[in-house]
């Protein structure tokens, strides 16, 4: 399997005020274009990602139950995006399929729960439309 460069935006630390560039970092690593053998995971190349207001709440540390999970410092931000399947262990997703759903703020993401992905059945529309109305 091929290895490629994978740029990721990670949260460096929890945000207490207005987010700044110091709170996030662009890191580069390598990733294999494959899913674990026997898994139902899907690997995607992210084409478009959304930056939505709800993300601000996920950047804060929550000591109490919250309506949505907080981001984990050191990991890629979880966001909505439009992607192309590059490897699949799931019978419903084939290499080359265009999908939208929850992914990572990175060039390539492994989606362990592809049930959260939706196939794009109208690729004649601009793909960026699938990230939401705020884009």
Image (cartoon, rainbow, N blue to C red):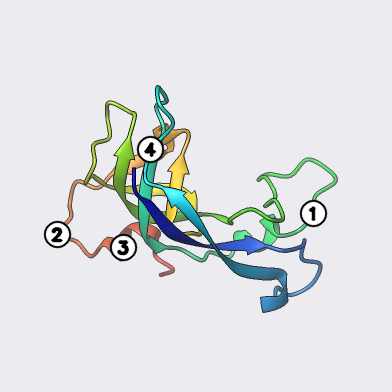
Q: Residues within 10 Å of mark 2 (few under 14, many from 20)?
A: few
Q: Which mark is residue 42?
A: 4
Relative to residue 46, is residue 120 drawn left or right? left
Q: Secondary structure at mark 2?
A: loop
Observer-side mark, 4 or 1, equals 4
Q: Which mark is residue 124?
A: 2
Q: Residues within 10 Å of mark 4 (few under 14, many from 20)?
A: many
> Circle 3 sits on which residue?
129
Could you give the CA–CA distance between mark 2 and mark 3, rounded to whole angstroms?
Answer: 11 Å
Q: Residues within 10 Å of mark 3 (few under 14, many from 20)?
A: few
Q: Position of residue 24 (x, y in %)?
A: 66, 69
Could you give the CA–CA distance between mark 1 and mark 3, rounded to whole angstroms?
Answer: 31 Å
Q: Determine whether 46 is above or below 33 in the image.
A: below
Give the mark, 4 or 3, whose residue is nearer the N terminus: 4
Q: Position of residue 28 (x, y in %)?
A: 54, 64
Could you give the CA–CA distance between mark 4 and mark 1, rounded to whole angstroms?
Answer: 29 Å
Give the mark, 1 or 3, whose residue is nearer the N terminus: 1
Q: Are marks 1 and 3 in contact (CB under 8 Å)?
A: no
> Circle 1 sits on which residue?
61
Q: Secondary structure at mark 3?
A: helix
Give the mark, 2 or 1, whose residue is nearer the N terminus: 1
Q: Residues within 10 Å of mark 1 (few under 14, many from 20)?
A: some
Q: Residue at x 31, y 63 (%)?
A: 129
Q: Determine whether 19 is above or below 42 in the image.
A: below
Q: Position of residue 1 (x, y in %)?
A: 34, 42
Observer-side mark, 2 or 4, equals 4
Give the mark, 4 or 1, whose residue is nearer the N terminus: 4
Could you give the CA–CA distance between mark 4 and mark 3, rounded to whole angstroms?
Answer: 22 Å
């Amino acid at each position: 399997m091929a290895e490629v460069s994978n740029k990721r935006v990670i949260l460096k630390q929890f945000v207490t005020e207005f987010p700044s560039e110091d709170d996030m970092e662009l890191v580069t690593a390598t990733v294999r274009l494959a899913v674990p053998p026997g898994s139902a995971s899907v690997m995607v190349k992210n084409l478009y990602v959304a930056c939505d207001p709800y993300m601000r709440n996920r950047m804060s540390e929550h000591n109490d139950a919250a309506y949505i999970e907080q981001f984990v410092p050191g990991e890629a931000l979880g966001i909505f995006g439009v992607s192309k399947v590059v490897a699949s262990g799931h019978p419903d997703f084939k290499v080359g399929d265009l999908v939208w759903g929850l992914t990572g703020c990175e060039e390539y993401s492994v989606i362990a729960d592809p049930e959260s992905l939706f196939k794009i059945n109208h690729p004649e529309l601009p793909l960026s439309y699938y990230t939401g109305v705020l884009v």
